[in-house]
Image (cartoon, helix red, strand yellow):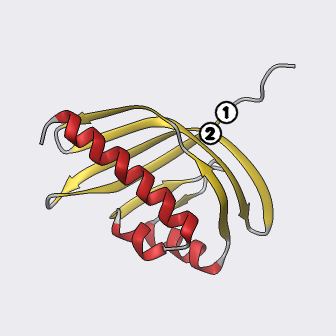
Amino acid sequence: MTSGDAEATIRSLEDARYAAVMAGDFAAFAAHAHPDLAYTHSNAVTDTLESYLDNLRSGFYVYHSIDHPVDRITVAGDTAVVVGEMHADITAGGTRKTLANRSLAVWVRDTGRWLLLAYQPTVLPEPAR
């Protein structure tokens, strides 16, 4: 697999993981995630794969819309780093929120499959007035 092929695969997997969460298909999300997933939220809370899935299934996190433009994907061996943004309209813990984040996602190739190992958003600063 060339670097370009890997980048296209990762871009497709990023789309698929966000689509799974939007569709409420948490089994599909889990299929894209590494068992040791560290999923950090913009409030600095970090979920494991199991705790994130529990929060999704219970309705603690409900995603109403997500836009996730990718700035670049860097593939180094069996690791891919995705740098971009994540803008979303969500309900978290019963509170409706609008998110605007820079984001970093780390994918690893494990037994021939690319799996999401880590996700870290950083809140974008408010525009100057």
Q: Is residue 6 placed above or below 113 in the rendered structure?
A: above
Task: Name the residue at 42% across, 45% down.
Answer: 105
Observer-nearest residue: 27 or 38? 27
- Mark identifier at residue 101: 2
Identify the image quadrant of residue 62.
bottom right
Image height of 35 relative to 69, above or below: below
The image shows residue 48 at horizontal and vertical percentages of 46, 65
> Which kind of residue does numbered mark 1 sit on?
Leu
Q: Residues within 10 Å of mark 1 (few under 14, many from 20)?
A: some
Quadrant of the rendered structure where residue 68 is?
top right
Q: Looking at the figure, which quarter contains the N terminus?
A: top left
Asked whether the residues under the numbered discs 1 and 2 touch, taking CB atoms below 8 Å apart as contact, a structural biologist would say: yes
Residue at x-position 67% and y-position 33%: 124
Task: Report helix, strand or loop for mark 2.
Answer: strand
* Place of residue 125 in the rendered image (x, y in percent of width and height, measured from the top left): 72, 29
Distance between mark 1 and mark 2 Cα atoms: 5 Å
Q: Which residue is mark 1?
A: 124
- Label disc, if present, on residue 115 of the rendered structure: none
Q: Horizontally, is 25 left or right of 55 in the view?
A: left
